[in-house]
Image (tube, grey):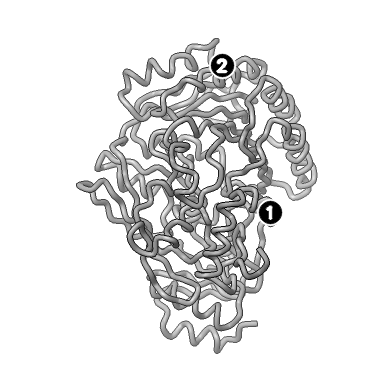
Amino acid sequence: MLSSSDVQSLRSHFHGDLLTPGDPGYDTARVVHNAMIDRHPALIARCVTPEDVAAVVTFAREHGQLLSVRCAGHNVVGFAVCDDGVVLDLSRMKRIEVDSSRKAVRAEAGLTWGEINDALQPHGLAATGGFVSLTGVGGLTLGGGLGWLVRKHGLALDNLLSAQVVLADGRRVAASAAENSDLFWALRGGGGNFGVVTSFEFNAHSDGTVLAGIVLHSREDARPALRVWRDASRTLPEELTDGALMFHFPENPAAPPSLHHAPVVGLGGVYAGAPDVGERVLAPIRNYGHPLVDTFEPMPYNAAQRMADHLFPSGHRNYWKSSYFRDVSDDALDVIVDFFGRVPSRDTVILLEHNGDGAFDRVPADATAFGDRRWPYNFIVISAWTDPADDERNIAWTRELFHTLRPHLADATYVNYLGEQGAAAVRAAYGPAQFTRLAELKLKYDPSNLFRMNQNIEPASAGV
């Protein structure tokens, strides 16, 4: 246990806030996106400088404390907080620098993707990470970085130019293709296993205005609508990142009352190119049937990134299951539609993402630590509800859907969508070659596995 004198020794050279149980703000600071996570750290260190980060890493290591690293706290497993240990909170580190002449942005780790794209928007630029604006830059990038530009420009980690990192021994280093290149390789997909990244430098792109939106159809029309989307997506150009989803339409004063809480299927996406060309590209999806709603229109990219935020509010109880599709067959789509017909919660969303057939899978498999790029379609069910009494029912439904869909899914998973599924699932997410190299680099950069509150990769010497 940490003593008050231990905490005071850190406080003497710490620039941010140190919160212990009972302090004002402690209970707010330990809350994360998933309301099922209710953990009580011994100490929450809200850093404001890289020196603060190095001090907390050293403090946790020297005192033998479990260490969690928090950016935006969006991960479903709740790795951002721990019981009894130390939370290294980066959420106050929000410095951002836009270099419009280089089309680059340097962002500290406490920023969200919405904040980054808000800063880029006046320059007519956009960054690649995040299907929603609330996701933190750190966790998303280190595990991959899907977003609305993934088919045109790749993952967030594919656009990473450099990173400033605090290692397990407290040293501050830079990582790039030219400096600590093995660490740079590991950071691009290896999650938080190798250090605390305090800032990232990314490529930005001249996609400040996009054609974005969604068309909605009733649940009764879901089967043919999903088939239309799947068939069209196979030939769509990479300027369009697209997907399909099933959800209950939220109550919205601007929408017809008949839509409130109605189960719907949505076909949506973001086209990053000339709007007139985008209109032609999207015609097969937008012209099908008689949509209940068609919201496609030109808009700033930072607005497009927010168009799905309302579907994923904080404070709900969350349970996720995900995998890449082996085949998006009629049978697979039928399973999804059938299960959605008996979904226990109106807050649950089923997503079918089309991320591949473009920049995402042109990156060589061994160029980064990211796992499997062979599968262009991804499936994720985000089960969400509010009453703890409904936990068992919602989790059971989610597991049954995933089990029934299993014959259509690949033996691979996007690591950022993994739940608490254990070491075998982490290995499968990376594949044998990537995982072996990551374990060797873990031995080099974090031999004691200080950074283990994550989808953990143990050091090679631990029998990996």
Q: How far from the left and from the top, in percent, is residue 244?
A: 56, 27
Residue at point 35%, 26% (across, down): 298
Residue at point 54%, 58% (across, down): 437
Say what secondary structure mark 2 lies in.
helix
**Label 1 crowd (10 A; few <14 / some 14-19 / many >=20):** some
Q: Which residue is nearer to you in this view: 403 or 390?
A: 403
How far, Cα to Cα, is label 1 from label 2?
A: 34 Å
Residue at point 67%, 16% (across, down): 220
Q: Quadrant of residue 153?
A: top left
Q: Give the numbered dot on residue 50.
A: none
On screen, 171 above or below 311?
A: below
Q: How far from the left and from the top, in percent, is residue 241?
A: 45, 31
Q: Please, what is the three-letter code of the amino acid marked with disc 1?
A: Glu
On screen, 45 above or below 32?
A: below
Q: Quadrant of residue 44?
A: bottom right
On screen, 50 above or below 438?
A: below
On screen, 295 above or below 316?
A: above
Q: Which residue is mark 1?
A: 420
Residue 419 appearing in the image: yes
| Quadrant where the image shows the N terminus | bottom right
Q: Please, what is the three-letter code of the amino acid marked with disc 2?
A: Val
Q: Quadrant of residue 363?
A: top left
Q: How far from the left and from the top, in percent, is residue 124?
A: 26, 39
**Label 2 crowd (10 A; few <14 / some 14-19 / many >=20):** some
| Quadrant where the image shows the C terminus | bottom right
Q: Which residue is nearer to you in this view: 433 or 56?
A: 433
Q: How far from the left and from the top, in percent, is residue 360?
A: 46, 38
Residue 347 appearing in the image: no
Q: Which residue is mark 2?
A: 228
Say what secondary structure mark 1 lies in.
loop
